[in-house]
Amino acid sequence: MAQIREIKTRMIAVGTIQRITKTMQMIATAKFTAAVQRTRATQPYTEKIRELVAAVCKDPSELDHPLVTADNKNGKDLILVIGSDRGFCGAYNANVLRKALRYYTAEVESGRDVVVEAAGKKAQNFFRFAKVDVAKFHDVGDKPAFEVVAAIADDLMDRFISGELASVKVAYMRFESNSRQIPEIQQLLPMEAPTGADEGEAGGSTSMYEFTPDEATLLNDLLPRAVRTALFQAFNDAVVSEQIMRMIAMKAATDNAAGLGRNLKRDYNRARQARITTELTEIVSGAAALS
């Protein structure tokens, strides 16, 4: 009797867990759909900014802008690690944080002075546990607002131009497709010089434009805007990757709970049948003893 009661208690607990994980899967699916729409909506703008920079910059080798050409040898290297605020998202945080920690360890061992900043409570707690000082925590949330991300980018650019930072890198999960997310460390600053416009079939430039205002004035606006959009795209990719990995993890948990529930149901039926058989045997034995 005690075994049957114990199995029934476990069945109730597993059923409750299954309902919770199913609900979390549905919530993650809804958030993933919204996050994908936001990411796809920002991609054309990000790509167009890059195209404009390449079109305006006639000769990348002569580009003289502090975001591209600054050589701050005495500055520190900064890595901004984008994690999640919540768990239950599979290996999402582990993949990004381990890659960031390997980069940090390699740079420190090579003699570089590396500053770590974190976005997401999991990233902050991970580096604290690893006894790595987190210089600043950015509370962006799971719906990054462009104004918030742009403020972070502006602060990084100001510190880079002033010489405080020698480079800025971003560790995040890049979203490629529903089945492929890649942990990546992207260099944000100094920016890579644009490749310029593509050559046409006749050998001439396809971007024969006259710019007003002049090229330098346009680049002074376009290059900071390109940094902001690149960082914003990284945050959006991170959110999409987090939600899809949470959706997959919760589906796996729901399926496992369903399988465990079936096994417990089978064990319950076997124990119940064994109890009934025992009771029938006792009744028959008692009747035989009385006759």
Image (cartoon, helix red, strand yellow):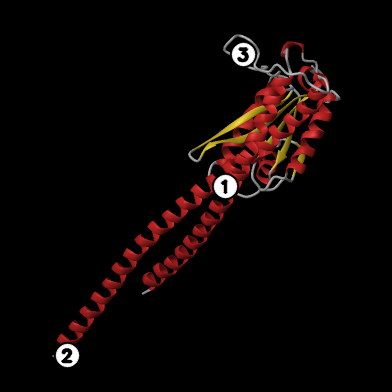
Residue found at x 52% / y 61%: 20
Task: Reply above or below: 174 against 77.
Answer: below
Task: Reply above or below: 257 against 158.
Answer: below
Q: Amino acid at mark 3?
A: Glu
Q: Do the CB atoms of the residues marked 2 and 3 lie less than 8 Å apart?
A: no
Q: Nearer the viewer, mark 1 or mark 3?
A: 3
Which is nearer the eye, 258 or 270? 258
Whether residue 270 is visible, yes or no, is yes
| First of labels 2, 3 by sequence position | 3
- In the picture provided, is 289 more to the left or to the right than 32? left
In the rendered structure, find residue 199 and report the number of the disc placed on it.
3
Label 3 SS: loop
* Residue identifier under label 2: 290
Residue placed farthest to the top in the image?
203
Q: Amino acid at mark 2?
A: Leu
Residue placed farthest to the right in the image?
162
Label 1 SS: helix
Q: Amino acid at mark 1?
A: Gln
Measuring from the top left, give residue 39's x and y in whole percent. 62, 41
Which quadrant does the N terminus fall into?
A: bottom left
Residue found at x 22% / y 80%: 280
Residue 78, quarter of picture: top right
